Image (cartoon, grey):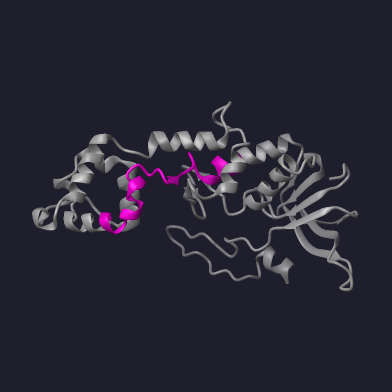
Amino acid sequence: MTSTRKAYFIGGGIGSLAGAAFLIRDGGLPGGQITILEAGPVMGGSLDGAGDAERGYTMRGGRMLTTDNYECTWDLFKSIPSVAQPGRSVFDETLAFNEQHMGFSMGDRVELLKLVSADEASLGASCITDHLSPAFFETEFWFMWVTTFAFQPWHSAVEFRRYLHRFMLEFSRIETLAGVKRTVFNQYDSLVVPLQQWLAGQGVRMLTDCTVTDIDHRGADRPFEVIALHCTVKGQAEIKQLEDGDLVFLQNGSMTDASSLGSMTAAPAKLKKAPNGSWTLWE
């Protein structure tokens, strides 16, 4: 790449943040020549865990990552330093957290395997608690299992065994949750914040409250080439002129567009596409 080429990312979601990081790390583009334009008040897009103990916590979805997939995610975060653990990458931090917190003891595993191996006649009308120690019901495995399948400790041991058999394909690693990875905190704090700090350290400009309202490009008889971005920055109209060779990456149509939050006394508002900048820019 030439030393003067600039890159603009429309939208501050994880796709744009990752794209900027790959441009710097793998593409050799200086961070000072990259700008990310985000309409909202913070970067991260749908990875937006926030709140406090007084107002409550909100998060428009949590993501479970897997060891054998998410190759690009893991590859990127091997390069991003952890905020909480200096000297470690976000990848190393996540791996260590899962090894320390997601498994259960050998005794728990033996009990569970005995239950799986038992025949239904011997289990009879017994409860799950008749076969597993109290400590088992404090493990992350149990919490994730009951969240997924709605079991309670007093439910039928036979039914529990049937579910274990039904998902035997994953059982070689599900007893330690080895195939599933969760970040230490929500994905905003564990992925977005360290990535954003790394980008800032590289000189990337990240503008919030900046809505791209229109894109100028050359005529239809020529290859599609963006020549200007029309923006509203904190209420003020601006036009960003592009030069030959500049790059524009449009991350349009967030997966959480038109989402809204309710409360203990009010239902979430039913939003349509009108209030959402992604749809407006697309049209």
- Dividing the picture into quadrants, the one containing residue 202 is top right
Does any portion of residue 13 appear in the rendered image?
Answer: no
User: Please, is residue 99 above or below residue 157 in the view?
Assistant: above
- Tell me residue 32's x, y (percent): 80, 40
Residue 165 belongs to magenta span:
yes
Q: Is residue 260 left or right of residue 237?
A: left
The residue nearer to you, when weighing 164 against 58, is 164
The residue nearer to you, when weighing 184 against 43, is 184
- Tell me residue 118's x, y (percent): 15, 51
Does any portion of residue 81 appear in the rendered image?
Answer: yes
Q: Is residue 259 left or right of residue 243?
A: left
Q: Looking at the rendering, in which quadrant would you find the C terminus?
A: bottom right
User: Please, is residue 131 above or below residue 252 in the view?
Assistant: above
- Tell me residue 63's x, y (percent): 49, 51
For the record, the magenta segment spans 164-193
**Residue at position x 48%, y 37% from top?**
95
**Residue at position x 82%, y 60% from top?**
230
**Residue at position x 47%, y 50% from top?**
64
